[in-house]
Amino acid sequence: MRCPNCGYEDEGNYCSNCGSPLNQPAATAPEKGLRWYERCPACRAGRLSKTVSRGFLGLTTTESYSCPNCGAVFTREGSRTFKLSNISDTSRPAWRDCANQTLSDEEWKRIADGGVSDARQRELNLDHLITAVREGQIPPLNAAAPGSIVPKKGERLVATIPAVTLSEPRSVRETHGGGAGPSVRIAKGVYIRTGGFASRSESHEEIRSIDSGTLTLTDRRLVFAGQKRTTSVNLGKIISIKPCEDGIAINREGKQKTEYYSGLDNAVLRFSIEGRDYEEPLSGAFFARLIEGLLKTD
Ligand SMILES: [Zn+2]
Ligand SMILES: [Zn+2]
């Protein structure tokens, strides 16, 4: 059946996507004016009752709210925060999602009304953003600062990232072993040592940083303006983009070497979804999705 809350197609008693009860859509309708403990956030049926217990020597007190219906216990942790510390049936979605979590009374109230915690909401909104971006629906991100490049007519700035490091692989050759005697190069990468033991030569790649500058993404180009060099790559010339730690690795037409841009997390992504404002350091994964999305809408 279809989840009345999120529309997810599922079976069983609870939606495995959002945790809403599948057979009682009425129970998830928000009720205005209720205090958070007046409807149990875990089972959405019981009313929590408050108990204050004195600790050893009577020096401390613990305030908790428990549900007679599902056995959920919420312990006061701060002036307006409560921890879900126990439940009878640990297979309940509320326990699976919120076991031992300390949330505000507002969040518990929202969960009782079929909603989710702030942290979960953030995850859902970020997932939503990434999906939209991948499809090429790029919302205003406010990661773009003017002034770094001159946009061409009709070109839209998407992101400007300061202090980005450009690195490229360089091959480093090492020769191991071998006895005395001059070495003679017979072919690229193969050396023979005369008059001594055979030796082998290995070359491996090292990623070396070669420049730092500002990386600008527009809806058409990726522009790196460094201290030593400036490159402007049409997005259509990009063969592959791979996220790596705090950056991306790009292969493009007409360039054999992979280019690594790191330090993308110097930029903060600001955006709002459904009236909620977010600030996230830019990640390589997100940046790669942005480029994929822009390529789709090309
Ligand atoms: Zn659902
Ligand atoms: Zn309950």
Image: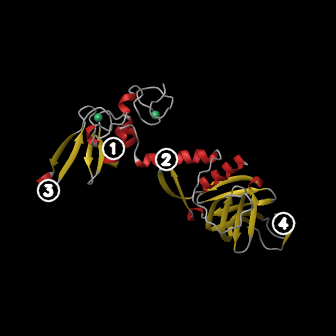
- Name which residue lies at 50% across and 47% down: 125
List the residue tagged with mark 4. 192
At x 49% / y 44%, what residue is drawn?
124
Kindly identify which residue carries mark 3: 59
State which tag comes first along the sequence, 4 or 1. 1
Q: Which residue is mark 1?
A: 108
Marks 4 and 3: which is nearer the front? 3
Tell me residue 112's x, y (percent).
Answer: 34, 38
Q: Amino acid at mark 1?
A: Trp
- Horizontal arrangement in the rendering, residue 148 relative to residue 38 (left or right): right
How much space separates mark 1 and mark 3, taking CA atoms? Answer: 28 Å
Residue 173 visible somewhere in the drawing? no
- Badge 2 or badge 1: first in the primary sequence: 1
Distance between mark 2 and mark 3 Cα atoms? 46 Å
Q: Is residue 278 left or right of residue 227?
A: left
Which residue type carries mark 3?
Answer: Leu
Q: Mark 2 and mark 4 in contact (Cβ < 8 Å)?
A: no
Give x and y (percent) for residue 190. Answer: 83, 63
Residue drawn at point x = 16 percent, y = 46 percent? 52
Q: Amino acid at mark 4?
A: Ile
Figure check: 249 above or below 36: below
CA separation in Å, label 4 and label 3: 82 Å
Of badges 2 and 1, nearer the viewer stands 2
Q: Nearer the viewer, mark 2 or mark 3?
A: 2
Q: Are marks 1 and 3 in contact (CB under 8 Å)?
A: no
Q: Which residue is mark 2?
A: 274
The residue nearer to you, when weighing 141 against 96, is 141
Tag 4–tag 1 contact (CB < 8 Å): no
Mark 1, Cα crowd under 10 Å, few <14 / some 14-19 / many 20+, is many
Amino acid tagged 2: Glu
Indicate which disc, 2 or 3, sits on the residue closer to the N terminus.
Answer: 3
Q: Is residue 161 above or below residue 80?
A: below
